[in-house]
Image: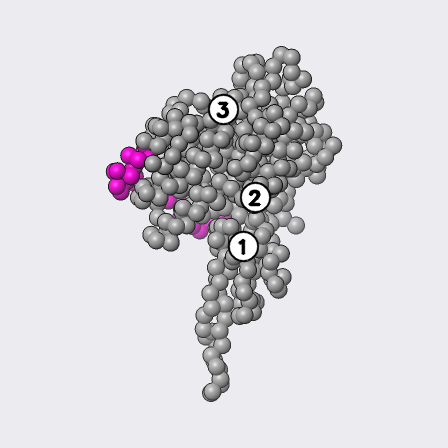
Amino acid sequence: MALSFCNSKATPHLQGVGVKFRGNRGVESVKNLIKKVGIPPLVSSPPESLRRGTWVKLICGASFEDVVDIRNLSLVYTLAGVDCIDCAADASAVGAVNEGIETARDICDLRRPWVMISVNDDEDLHFRKAEFDPEDCPLDCSRPCELVCPANAISIEEEQSDAQVSYGGSVPHKLKGGVITERCYGCGRCFPVCPYDRIRAATYVRDASTTSRLLKRNDVDAVEIHTNGRQTARFEELWDSLGDSMGYLKLVAVSLPYNGDSTLSLMNALYTVMEPRLSLFNLWQLDGRPMSGDIGRGATRESIAFAVCLATARNRPPGFLQLAGGTNAHTVNGLKREGLFRMYSGENSKDKTMVPGLPNSPHALISGIAYGGYARKIVGRVLNSMHSKHGPALIEHHPEYLLEALVEALALVRTVKGYDQFTSK
């Protein structure tokens, strides 16, 4: 049974962080790189990117709440030109995203990406945390959970116990630490590798009233509702609970898995629920293979197959289509092989979907791609290197790392955006 989950983190919001760049030369290198690759500064709004098929979303993680990393990731990917940054429905996470965005815009005059929060209507892989008691772990365990965690969210150390021992006995030791809750985003890789089956999943559902208050802030632009596709009753309950807060937004997205022949009927049923109060853009996130974007070449196949099924479906409900779940550096090439990358609908196309709020001109069958685990991984390597040397630092204070991280982010984002080729020189 899913647990109710509210704004839980005690991690403080990064308030009042001043922008003080250390090393003007390094910052100038960042500005020059952005200028060189031709990132449009004030054009190509998020809706226009959706219409053109050049939309890119960064997924920070629906359960990831490390505010320093979220801030740094948001800064780097704003500089790289993403259209949207998706984060946990948590006030501290939202604040960290916005601080990263505004710091990036202090460096270069770029348009502001939309900020999205993610919620769920029922149990979902994206809304869980790993948990275990390290004192239950044998001292001789090789701790494979630490090795496989992509978020560095597990830390176990041995310490001397406070327990008294009889004369001549050895001082017992125990393990401390465990899961760093704010860093865990529920990927589940630690579950099967535990030799003693001690790791559990704690699932939760985001609180609707807390979500509604977040949506009414002036720094949230969109919401994404994750649904498991089994039935629509919980979705309708959540939609009704959000009520007038939807009027504060620019876009609502629905993330759903592929459910075979029933997928289209589910989408139409969900659209029927939304339509009476749908006065904003809507988007369908095709979650091909959740939590797998940083695994390898084959991870993106299911997401592309999902896109192939829906791209030209006659009875698809209105809304943009965006890939997720297994997306990585191979996704764009996969779409090109299927003839779906920047393929446009037109008067003679079987696709007659009309997009509310945009002219009835041809628009891309696949509007864009969301990158999660893979996007965090390639920039995370740089952040981890910086943190190991300087602690939990703000990346603009170390422009050499910012430049390195931006090169990684641009290499990914440019495959969709079509920026000019570049080097880090």
> In percent of the image, x 58 and y 52: which residue is there?
189
> In percent of the image, x 52 and y 53: which residue is there?
149
> In percent of the image, x 56 and y 43: which residue is there?
296
Q: Disc 3, disc 2: CB below 8 Å? A: no
Q: Residue furthest top?
A: 347
- Comparing 377 with 113, the one in front is 377
Q: Dot 2 lies on which element?
A: loop
In primary-sequence order, the first of circles 1 and 2 is 1
- Comparing 30 with 118, the one in front is 30
Amino acid under label 2?
Gly
Q: Considering only vertical position in the picture, is 103 above or below 160?
A: above
Q: Could you say which quadrant of the image residue 97 lies in?
A: top left
Q: Dot 1 lies on which element?
A: helix
Name the residue tied to disc 1: 148
- Comparing 416 with 325, the one in front is 416
Packing grade of label 2 (10 A; few <14, some 14-19, many >=20) is some
Instruction: Using the numbered discs, state the Cα–Cα distance from disc 1 to disc 3 in whole angstroms.
Output: 36 Å
Q: Dot 3 lies on which element?
A: helix
Residue 252 % position (x, y): 55, 29
Residue 237 % position (x, y): 64, 36
Q: Could you say which quadrant of the image residue 361 lies in?
A: top right
Residue 398 % position (x, y): 31, 44
Which label belongs to residue 296? 2
- Comparing 396 with 417, the one in front is 417
Tell me if 219 is positioned left or right of 305 in this view. Answer: left
Instruction: Using the numbered discs, state the Cα–Cα distance from disc 1 to disc 2 in whole angstroms.
Output: 15 Å
